[in-house]
Amino acid sequence: MIKRQTRPPRKKHENYDLNVFINCPFDDQFKPLLQAIAFAIHSCGFVARCAQEDSAQNVRFTRILDIIGECRFGIHDLSRINLEADVMPRNNMPLELGVFIGTQRFGTPYDYEKEYLVLDSIPHRYKEHITDLGGEDPSIHKNDPAEVIRCVREWLKPRARQSEQKMIASPSILFEQLELFQQEAPEICERRSLRFTELTFSEYTEILTEWLDEKRKLVKDLDDIVHGYKL
């Protein structure tokens, strides 16, 4: 019998407790929702991760496994599982959800802390194709970026650091901020010789982080002025 080689234990990623794995479709139709999910994640003080981020690895599923191992949180969208006749369903998302749940159960001790949110576009639809998820209660976004921001924000806010929780705006305000970001981002991109419509996921989150940091600094400066005036 061939003895399997023992793998070295994984080291906990430095941002493990802030990393959020996004498991979703990457087609053009879903892109506005993906961008909204990433915006909500970063607005809540977390870091969005997904298979589309820049990597030297060529094997996509190996990259996905590595990212799952580096993330405490996962957001899994099941809305693109087509149940129409003669249409092959998209099974990548359920597969990655299963890997995430398996890692939570059988991974390293820190993986036991993993938590995940399931998203869908239609209530109770998952019961037709993933019956083992019975008892789960997916959040419904209706294919609406404003709704997906609400779903992600409501799930992440209680899990955010105390210092971040008081900075997290209401869902409708976050959506307004997303629209403002989309208006201002092309100018930021132009300074870097980039086009907003052609950004990779990594470039998108980099531009987003820069924009959010700038807005937070403005809020902090204003707060310092107000409190200084009161003194």
Image: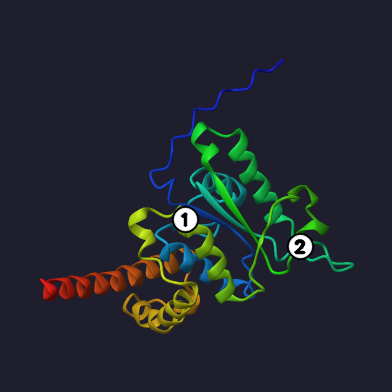
* Residue found at x 53% / y 32%: 108
Judged from the image, the secondary structure of the residue bearing numbered disc 2 is: loop
Judged from the image, the secondary structure of the residue bearing numbered disc 1 is: helix
Quadrant placement of the N terminus: top right
In the displayed structure, does residue 22 sit left or right of residue 80?
left
Give the numbered dot on residue 124: 2
* Residue found at x 41% / y 78%: 181
**What distance separates the C-alpha of mark 1 from that of mark 2?**
25 Å
User: Quick one: 101 or 57, which is closer to the camera?
Assistant: 101
Q: How many numbered badges does the structure rendering display? A: 2
Residue 101, image quadrant:
top right
Give the numbered dot on residue 158: 1
Between discs 1 and 2, the one toward the N terminus? 2
- Please report contact status of discs 1 and 2: CB closer than 8 Å, yes or no: no
Residue 137: image location, x then y, percent: 68, 57
Asked whether residue 88 is in view, the answer is: yes
Rendered position, 169 above or below 136: below
Q: Nearer the viewer, mark 1 or mark 2?
A: 1
Quadrant placement of the C terminus: bottom left
* Residue found at x 36% / y 63%: 166
- The single residue placed furthest to the right in the displayed view is 85
Residue 35: image location, x then y, percent: 52, 70
Residue 195: image location, x then y, percent: 43, 79
Q: What residue type is disc 2 on?
A: His
Q: What residue type is disc 1 on?
A: Pro
In the displayed structure, does residue 88 sit left or right of residue 1?
right
Rendered position, 63 above or below 110: below
- The single residue placed furthest to the front in the displayed view is 230
